[in-house]
C-alpha cells in the first residue's frame, strides 16, 4: 500500500511540473527602446523635454528647471602688493569667464576687487576699485564682452577672506570675486570653473 501511495504521489508531482512548464509566460517584448538621444540620463520614452541645455539640471521627466540665478566665485587671480596689474598668466581665467558669459548672454557679472588689510582704508578702497576695473577692461577690450554687462566694484578690506597677518593671508585677500547674476529667467546650470569664495 505504501508503494502504491508513493507511485501516485510521484505521478502527481510530475504532472504538476509538466503543467507548470506548459503554462510558462511568453518572453517579454520590449515596447520602447532605451535610447537617450540627449545624453541627459532620461530615456527618450520618458523624456518630456527634448531640447534641454547640455549640462542643465533636470528632473525625472528630463526637463530643466528655471530660476532667478546668482552665484559668487573667486577668480584665481593674484596681485602683487600695492598693484592692480593683471599678469598675462591670468588671462586664461578671465577668458573662461568671458566664454561663460557668451554662452549665457542674459547673464551679467559684477567684478569685485578686494585687498589685504595693509595700509589705510582710503588707499585700499581705491586700489581694490582699480583691480576690479582692470579685470573689467580685459573682459571688455580683449574678450569682447559688452561693458554694460560688467560692473566693477572695489571693497577694500571690508570683506576679508582670511584673518591674520602673514604674507599667505595677505596674498589670499588680494583677490577678485565674480558675481554672476540675472534679473531674467535662466536655465538652471552649475558654474564650476572657479573655486567658491565662501564668507559669512
Image (tube, rainbow, N blue to C red):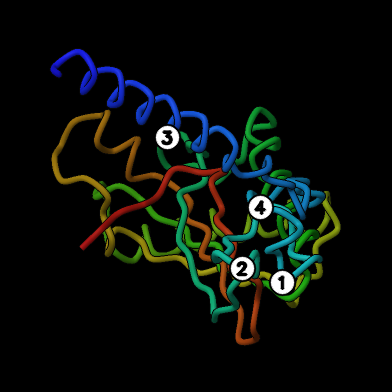
Give the Cα distance between marks 4 and 2. Answer: 15 Å
Q: Earlier in the sequence, mark 4 or mark 2?
A: 4
Q: In this picture, is 180 found above or below 68?
A: above
Q: Earlier in the sequence, mark 3 or mark 4?
A: 3
Give the structural element (helix, strand or loop) at label 2.
loop
Q: Is residue 98 left or right of residue 152?
A: right
> Are the residues flagged by discs 4 and 2 in contact, CB closer than 8 Å?
no
Which residue sits at x=48%, y=51%?
176
Q: Is residue 123 left or right of residue 36?
A: left
Q: Which residue is mark 2?
A: 61
> Are the residues flagged by discs 2 and 1 in contact, CB closer than 8 Å?
yes
Give the Cα distance between marks 3 and 4. Answer: 56 Å
Q: Which residue is mark 1?
A: 48
Q: Nearer the viewer, mark 3 or mark 1?
A: 3
Give the Cα distance between marks 3 and 2. Answer: 45 Å
Residue 169: percent from the left, percent from the top?
24, 36
Q: Which residue is mark 3?
A: 16
Q: Earlier in the sequence, mark 3 or mark 1?
A: 3
Mark 1: few/some/many CA within 10 Å (<14, 14-19, 20+)? some
Q: Which residue is mark 4?
A: 55
Q: Nearer the viewer, mark 4 or mark 2?
A: 2
Mark 3: few/some/many CA within 10 Å (<14, 14-19, 20+)? few
In this rendered view, identify the residue nearer to me: 40 or 68. 40
Amino acid at each position: 500500500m505504501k508503494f502504491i501511495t508513493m507511485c501516485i504521489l510521484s505521478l502527481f508531482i510530475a504532472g504538476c511540473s509538466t503543467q507548470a512548464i506548459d503554462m510558462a509566460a511568453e518572453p517579454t517584448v520590449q515596447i520602447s527602446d532605451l535610447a537617450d538621444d540627449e545624453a541627459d540620463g532620461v530615456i527618450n520614452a520618458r523624456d518630456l523635454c527634448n531640447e534641454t541645455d547640455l549640462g542643465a539640471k533636470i528632473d525625472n521627466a528630463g526637463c530643466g528647471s528655471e530660476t532667478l540665478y546668482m552665484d559668487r566665485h573667486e577668480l584665481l587671480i593674484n596681485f602683487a602688493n600695492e598693484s592692480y596689474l593683471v599678469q598675462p598668466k591670468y588671462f586664461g581665467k578671465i577668458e573662461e569667464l568671458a566664454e561663460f558669459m557668451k554662452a549665457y548672454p542674459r547673464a551679467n557679472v559684477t567684478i569685485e576687487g578686494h585687498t589685504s588689510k595693509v595700509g589705510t582704508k582710503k588707499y585700499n578702497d581705491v586700489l581694490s576699485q582699480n583691480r576690479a576695473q582692470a579685470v573689467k577692461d580685459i573682459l571688455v577690450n580683449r574678450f569682447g564682452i559688452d561693458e554694460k554687462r560688467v560692473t566693477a566694484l572695489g571693497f577694500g578690506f571690508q570683506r576679508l577672506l582670511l584673518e591674520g597677518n602673514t604674507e599667505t593671508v595677505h596674498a589670499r585677500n588680494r583677490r577678485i570675486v565674480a558675481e554672476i547674476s540675472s534679473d531674467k529667467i535662466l536655465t538652471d546650470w552649475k558654474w564650476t570653473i572657479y573655486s567658491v569664495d565662501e564668507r559669512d
